[in-house]
Image (spheres, helix red, strand yellow):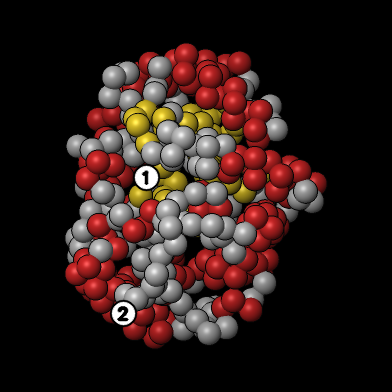
Amino acid sequence: MTTNENTSASVSASDSASTAATARRLGATGPSVFPLGLGCMGMSALYGEADRAESIATIHAFLEAAPEGMNTLLDTGDFYGMGHNELLINEALRTAPAAAREQALTSVKFGALRTVEGGFTGYDGRPAAVKNFLAYSLQRLGRDHIDVYRIARVDPDVPIEETVGAIAEAVQAGHVRHIGLSEVGADTLRRAAAVAPISDLQIEYSLISRGIEDRILPTARELGIGVTAYGVLSRGLISGHFSRDRALAPGDFRGMSPRFQGENLARNLDLVEALRKVAGEKGVSVAQIAIAWVLAQGPLRGVDIVPLVGARRRDRLTEALGALRIELTDADLAAIEAAVPAGAASGDRYPAAQMAHLDSEH
């Protein structure tokens, strides 16, 4: 069963999820979770102002979309809004129905160093810093443990073994349940996994960000590590809702993103229009078919992949949940990849200064 692009927003979140909510496991050692996670960053930072009440309502809708007894995954970073996002999640969990609250899992990134003005100045992966970041996150979240804890980017001055070892100590102490990684390459993934079990790698993966397919995904499969894929709609670029003349709010990250600039934007939106034709033939929205493509890659590549959707509103969440009901045939997959071939995107996924911090790109 599929939904039409014009009517998908009218389907309730619970109905959208009910027909295909088969749990996925975050690696051999991690928890089983609802097949979509909710990335909460945009509710606090980098995409302009967000409506607090609507953000909390969206988190509630996501928690309630999962079948009874199935864990849900809320993803955040302690530096999203300088702690604002963790406090927002705290409020959402405190006000959620008890059953939904009890099955909510938190995935937290740490390590980014910020300025008062909002700039980024590097990453700190020292063991003492890990313990400090963790203490503050537990307080802001109002929880006695974090389910998956990971450094946002590798600290080039600290061996990954030391950072992962510090998280492993927090696991032993009961403050963390599972160790994750973020944006690391295959070699770093191996080094980290030699220290302690790694549940999942969080990394950008979408139709127009496929660099992980050559080495990183095969390494994750070999090591029994799952993937939480962020940017599955490339920050809205391939959602079907972005246009060439869209004015971005002050502080919106996309104003500095190469893929949203000039001719890059025009060429990328041409790809979206090609994808829209495929989606229309399937009777679904562009966003839904893009998410469904990522969902399909897990079984195809032998890795459990949980896409993170960055919905800030309930209507966008409902649309995203509709992707769970889409079954892509071999012909569908071929048509999607013909519309958006691997390597077809124009522009890097981050500005040059941020690309330099990506171990996954080295």
Between 281 and 258, the one lying in front of the other is: 258
* Sequence-first disc among 1 and 2: 1
Q: Which amino acid, by three-letter code, is at mark 2?
A: Glu
Please state the total of marks drawn on the protein image: 2
Q: Is residue 4 above or below residue 86?
A: below
| Relative image position of residue 147 (x, y in whole percent) | 59, 34
Tell me: 8 left or right of 191.
right
For disc 1, the marked residue is 203
Q: Position of residue 231 (x, y in %)?
A: 39, 55
**Quadrant in which the C terminus appears:** top left
Residue at 60% x, 70% y: name it: 315
Q: Is 163 placed above or below 54 here?
A: above
Q: Could you say which is closer to the camera, residue 255 or residue 117?
A: 117
Asked which secondary structure carries label 2, the reply is helix
Disc marking residue 273: 2
Q: Position of residue 29 (x, y in %)?
A: 50, 32
**Residue lying at 41% horizontally and 30% vertically, measured from the top left:** 113
Quarter the N terminus occupies: bottom right
Location of residue 332 (image quadrant): bottom left
